[in-house]
Image (tube, coloured by chain):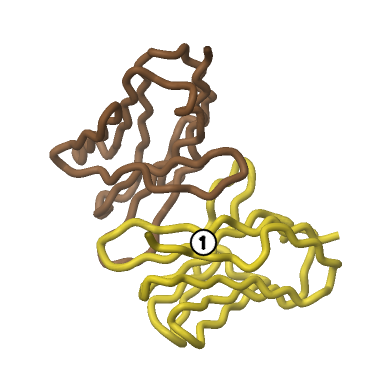
Chain colours: A yellow, B brown
Amino acid sequence: DVKVTQSSRYLVKRTGEKVFLECVQDMDHENMFWYRQDPGLGLRLIYFSYDVKMKEKGDIPEGYSVSREKKERFSLILESASTNQTSMYLCASSTQGYGYTFGSGTRLTVV
Amino acid sequence: RKEVEQDPGPFNVPEGATVAFNCTYSNSASQSFFWYRQDCRKEPKLLMSVYSSGNEDGRFTAQLNRASQYISLLIRDSKLSDSATYLCVVTLSGTYKYIFGTGTRLKVLA
């Protein structure tokens, strides 16, 4: 089975801090994604990448950046964390023609 | 109009009941369709793909109606363990990204 691992399950950060969320997948998938999930709003795509060093903006990229230096790793960066970025962050990977596999999520609280 | 719409529920049904959810999508160029299941405070997991001819996996049946632009999920003989949120997912032709509905919450009651 594909495994997608997110580095932290729970994270508490202060407003203004730079935050790194790491995601690693072990099945050589080309595509990787970062979503945030909020009650009533569902899953919203922040950024995605379909190859090493490639990135595309999703629906809500403001306040975030990403890095994909290696195929298996996709990092989400909050340049200056704000309270409205408190959310559940989900990383996913996929290969052509197959559904996503998600990591177990990082619940980020910004205080 | 949202790209993918679902009734949020909750659907409260007794054990053994049959329950059906619908999901409508707005873009006629939508290509692939899936149902995901998400348990409370867990990540979504793929339940099943939805094919044009319809498909069945045990107690679960998925249907696609392209003319009316909706997909459905039918659960027969509901179990307590079926309690979860069911997410409808649509992809557009030529893209890698999925569009998620906000989910339908199901509670199966003893």
Chain identity of mark 1 = A
Residue B33, how many percent across, how many down? 29, 48
In the rendered image, is residue B43 in sight?
yes
Relative to A2, residue A18 above or below: below
Residue A21, how many percent across, how many down? 65, 71
- Residue reaching furthest to the front: A1
Crowd class of label 1 (few under 14; some 14 to 19; many from 20; radius 10 Å): many
Q: Where, quadrant-wise, is the C terminus of chain A in this rendering? A: bottom right
Q: Residue at x 31, y 32 (%)?
A: B72
Relative to B84, residue B43 above or below: below
Relative to A39, residue A87 above or below: below
Relative to A90, residue A69 above or below: below
Residue A38 shown left or right of residue A52 in the figure:
right
Residue at numbered disc 1: A45
Q: Secondary structure at mark 1?
A: strand
Report which quarter residue A107 is drawn in: bottom right
In the rendered image, is residue A59 in sight?
no
- As rendered, which of A55 and A95 lies closer to the eye? A95
Report which quarter residue A39 is drawn in: top right
- Residue reaching furthest to the left: B53
Q: Residue at x 35, y 23 (%)?
A: B20
Residue B89 shown left or right of residue A20 in the figure:
left
Q: How many numbered markers are drawn?
A: 1
Report which quarter residue A2 is drawn in: bottom left
Residue A49 shown left or right of residue B72 in the figure:
right
- As rendered, which of A45 and B26 lies closer to the eye? A45
Under mark 1, the amino acid is Leu
Residue B85, how many percent across, how many down? 50, 35
Q: Where, quadrant-wise, is the N terminus of chain A in this rendering? A: bottom left
- As rendered, which of A43 and B1 lies closer to the eye? A43
Q: Residue at x 47, y 30 (%)?
A: B7
Q: Residue at x 44, y 49 (%)?
A: B100
